[in-house]
Amino acid sequence: MSRVLGQCVTYTAFAAVIGLLSVWPEYRMLSQQDAIISLSFSHAAERVGECRQLTQEEMNELPPNMRKPNACPRERHSAYVEVRADNEVLFAETLLPSGLWQDGKINIYHRSTLPAGKYQLFIGMNDSGGNAGFDYEHTANLQIAPGQNLVIGFDNLTNTFVVE
């Protein structure tokens, strides 16, 4: 009887310690007044060159299984992405396309922490290899609450940035 009672006391003490450690010490990813801006999307940049139509002679030189009317380069441009909150740069980087021949999408995931409050948010991306300006850009006036995770994505169907 005393053995069973001892086991019950031991198991109860063990469960109490586990329960205590599950809530104490308190852990916070952010301070009470901070918020997170997450930039997360995949995008296929513009191709490095234009597609051109093959002549009949060029198509005849190709094996039958490789004959297609257009020849397009595989390689894609790198993409420059910039995010600013009230003219403070949160992220600015040139991203290379994935793939062996640099013919895939650029993939981005970046998190920035900033104090909660009102911000004018600017997101811009240049994916055409041009040096001046952005091909896609979005500006929004936002009220960011403490603890909020604001996510920025890119809709490839409408070619616009999405802020959620």
Image (tube, rainbow, N blue to C red):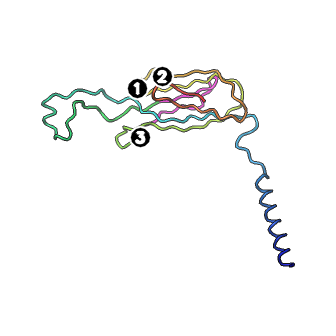
* Label whose residue precedes the other's in the sequence (3 or 2): 3
Are the residues at dot 1 and dot 2 in contact (C-beta closer than 8 Å)?
no
How packed mark 1 is, by other alpha carbons closer than 10 Å (few <14, some 14-19, many 20 or more), is some
Residue stretch in magenta: 80-97
Question: Would you say the magenta stretch is mainly helix, strand or loop?
Answer: strand
Q: CA distance from mark 3 to mark 2?
A: 21 Å
Q: Amino acid at mark 1?
A: Ser
Q: Amino acid at mark 2?
A: Phe
Q: In the rendered picture of this protein, how many numbered marks are placed on residues? A: 3
Q: Residue 117 at what x, y percent from top left?
A: 72, 26
Residue tagged by mark 1? 128
Q: Quadrant of the N terminus?
A: bottom right
Residue tagged by mark 3? 98
Residue in the foreground of this view, choosing between 14 and 136: 14
- Determine the secondary structure under disc 3: loop
Q: Residue 73 at what x, y percent from top left?
A: 29, 33
Residue at position x 57%, y 28% in the image: 83
Left or right position of 48 against 8: left
Q: CA distance from mark 1 to mark 3?
A: 16 Å
- Determine the secondary structure under disc 2: loop
* Label whose residue precedes the other's in the sequence (1 or 3): 3
